[in-house]
Every structure is written in C-alpha cells, then in structure tokens.
Image (cartoon, rainbow, N blue to C red):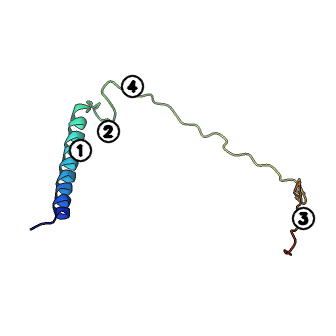
Amino acid sequence: MKSNQQVRQGRVKVFAAVMSGSAVVAMGALSVALHEEQAPGASGGVATGTTFIQGSMTMGQTATTTTPPAAPVTSIATPPMTAATPAGFR
C-alpha cells in the first residue's frame, strides 16, 4: 500500500506533466496564429510588404586623444574629518 506522501508525489508529477504539455500546445497554437507571411528572399521575421532602404554606412571618428596633465590634480587626499582613537586601542 502506498503512503499519502507517495500518492501526493504521483499527483504532483502528473499535474506538472499536464501543465507542461498544455504550455507546449499553447506556444504552438500562438506560433501558428501569429505567423506572418514572409517576403520572398527575406530572412526570418520580415513581413510581406516591408520596404528595404539601401544605403551606405559611414565610419566616423570614434575616439579622441588628449595629453594627460603632468601632475595629478590632487597630490594627497585628506579626509575632511579625523577621529580620536578610543582608550584601549592603538
């Protein structure tokens, strides 16, 4: 005789299988329902009646170079506040 836990595990597995199968069927149905015709010679995802614009790509200047300063702007950083060491600490 099976224990209650084994029965519940079996039911959960069946439920998970049914839900997974229905999700796959729903994705297939949506894929068929939302499928658009493609233009001849077009790659995936291009609908019929799409206008293609042919142009040329230009490669402009992408970086500028500058000379770094001779010395850093801040030579030594100092905190705006200092704290006293409590008694018992070094």
**CB-based contact (under 8 Å), mark 3 and mark 2:** no
Label drawn at residue 84: 3
Report x, y in % for residue 55. Answer: 49, 31
Label drawn at residue 47: none
**CB-based contact (under 8 Å), mark 3 and mark 4:** no
For label 3, count other residues whose C-alpha is less than 10 Å away and answer few (under 14), some (14-19) or many (20+).
Answer: few
The residues tagged by marks 1 and 4 sit, at their Cα atoms, a distance apart of 35 Å
Q: Depth check: 64 or 76 in front?
A: 76
Q: Amino acid at mark 4?
A: Thr
Q: Mark 3, mark 4: which one is toward the viewer? A: 3
Q: Amino acid at mark 3?
A: Ala
For label 2, count other residues whose C-alpha is less than 10 Å away and answer few (under 14), some (14-19) or many (20+).
Answer: few
Secondary structure beneath dot 4 equals: loop
Residue lying at 19% horizontally and 44% vertically, measured from the top left:
22
Quadrant in which the C terminus appears: bottom right
Rendered position, 74 above or below 84 = above
Mark 4 highlights which residue? 51
Mark 2 highlights which residue? 44
Which comes before the other along the chain, label 3 or label 4? 4
The residues tagged by marks 4 and 2 sit, at their Cα atoms, a distance apart of 15 Å
Residue lying at 44% horizontally and 28% vertically, measured from the top left:
53
The residues tagged by marks 3 and 2 sit, at their Cα atoms, a distance apart of 70 Å
Q: Amino acid at mark 2?
A: Gly
Label drawn at residue 23: 1
The residues tagged by marks 3 and 1 sit, at their Cα atoms, a distance apart of 66 Å
The residues tagged by marks 3 and 4 sit, at their Cα atoms, a distance apart of 73 Å
Report x, y in % for residue 15. Answer: 19, 51
Which comes before the other along the chain, label 1 or label 4? 1
Which comes before the other along the chain, label 3 or label 2? 2
Residue lying at 87% horizontally and 53% vertically, measured from the top left:
69
